[in-house]
Amino acid sequence: MNRVEVFADPVLLKLGPVPLTQTMVTTIAVSLAMVAFAAALRFGITRRPGKTLDILAGMAFEFLDRLVTDVVGRPSPRLTIFSGTLFFFIASCSIIGQLPGVRTPTANLATTSALAILVFLAVPAAGIYTKGVWGYIRHYFRPNPILFPLHVISELSRTLALSVRLFGNMMSGHLIVALLVALVGVLVPTPLMALDLLIGFLQAYIFAVLTTVYVGAAIRVGEE
């Protein structure tokens, strides 16, 4: 029986016409784990305010909120939630990718492309929400209408760059660790696994920062 693949990812089963790949299963598992952890964290904070969990959660939100405020120039809770969710999702994918036999979802081009498309759609959505349809669209024609194609190409190219950058960094690190584990066993590559995890967190941070910059620029369209 021939193995069916999508984006070089084996198809485990089909739900009607929809193929369910290994990366999709891992992504769903990460998403459900994040939701469960967030619910447990919220329950723990409301039951025991002022404790360690409350302090750590407050520090994480304050860090993300400060990042958004520095970029946008004012607080933007929606952008904080959006960028923070992307950060924690990519970081969680890096963590689960350290498990034996599990490939991090962000080492698949389909996943990184989906994340980049989310950012691509969030940019005009934030700009239109803040400035209105015409208030946002007219920035494409400034300072000269001739530059309109260049503005469009710029947004498309940075979306592609977001996807390929994250995919390349995550795939290369995971591939190197997997090869070393196969060749010399589990214990020897442990420092490299820790380095791979650190790189994953760094890529999550970079992706969140770039998302904040792109969406923040759309929010500040037309401002001096």
Image (spheres, helix red, strand yellow):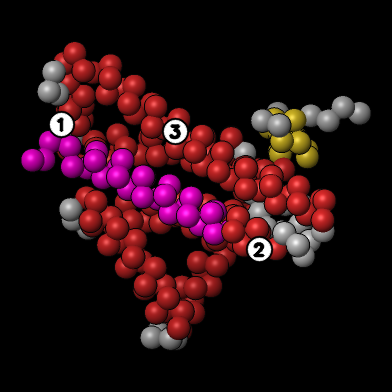
Task: Examine the rendering and report whether any part of residue 32 can be seen.
Answer: no
User: Residue 93 bears which disc, if any?
Assistant: none
Which percent across, then down, holds residue 213?
A: 30, 45
Mark 2, Cα crowd under 10 Å, few <14 / some 14-19 / many 20+, is few
Query: What residue does disc 1 label?
Result: 135
Is 51 left, or right, of 102 in this rendering?
left
Residues in magenta, as a range = 197-224
Which residue bears the numbered disc 3?
Answer: 161
Name the quadrant containing residue 148: top left
Of the two numbered discs 3 and 1 on the same chain, state the one appearing first in sequence. 1
Quarter of the figure with the C terminus? top left
The residue shown at (47%, 55%) is 202
State the mark number for residue 191: 2
Q: Is residue 68 left or right of residue 210?
A: left
Compared to residue 120, the image places residue 84 above or below, namely below
Give the residue displayed 41% in from the left and 79% down from the top: 54
- What is the spatial separation of the Cα atoms under label 2 and label 3, in whole angstroms? 29 Å
Q: Mark 1 vs mark 2: give the one in front.
A: 2
For mark 1, does the 10 Å Cα neighbourhood hold few (<14), some (14 to 19), or many (20 or more) residues? some
| Crowd rating for badge 3 (residues with CA inside 10 Å; few <14, some 14–19, many 20+) | some
Q: Can residue 39 be seen in this snapshot?
A: yes
From the top left corner, tell me how far across and down residue 30 is, in percent: 61, 55
